[in-house]
Amino acid sequence: MDQLLENHQLPKNQEEIYRNHWRTIQESVKIWRFKDVYHFPLFGNEDVFTIVKGVINKYSHGIKMNVAFGFILRDRTSEELKFFHPSNNSNMFPIPRLIMKPEDTKNLEDDLEKIDILEYVRAQRPSSNWTVEKIICVRLDIYKLTQ
């Protein structure tokens, strides 16, 4: 963790968020029978669709996918920082996107390009008193379809 903080030169005021929530932020995968959950940290130069496509390519059968982001919020009054967890309660799409063929992947890419991710994240804030400081991770929920 300390090496990571040094490599990415995180602002000092954000280090505590990263330390306290690293288990959620860090790259990880949980594999279950019908659903897999992937987490990837975002340090600013990652292309979200490249991450999404890399995960899609791991599956040889159809899947459904949804995307959620974790981010740091700043209270406008107190300057307090807090972490907003990515979860299935804050998914980007109202229902998971079906990925069965290459055209589905292309449609997902087009949709992700059209969506203003920062505006989507702003809509997740608990109130307008909180501003989005930084998007720091992405969660991908994969629902495996049976053949």
Image: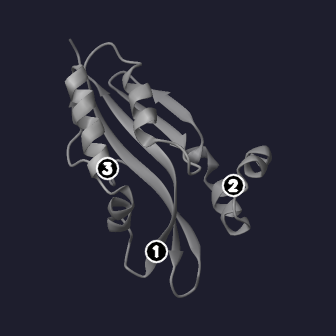
Q: Which residue is mark 2?
A: 19
Name the residue tied to disc 1.
131
Q: Quadrant of residue 147?
A: top left
Q: Amino acid at mark 2?
A: Arg
Tell me the SS state at disc 1.
Answer: strand
Q: Give the tally of numbered discs.
A: 3
Q: Earlier in the sequence, mark 2 or mark 3?
A: 2
Q: Residue at x 39, y 61 (%)?
A: 118
Residue 44 drawn above or below residue 73 = above
Of residues 110 and 82, the one nearer the viewer is: 110
Q: Amino acid at mark 3?
A: Asn
Task: Tell which circle, 1 or 2, labels the residue nearer the N-terminal end.
Answer: 2
Alpha carbon separation for disc pair 1 and 3:
19 Å
Check the picture and name the quadrant holding the N terminus: top right
Per the image, the residue denoted by label 3 is 91
Distance of label 2 from label 3 (alpha carbons): 24 Å
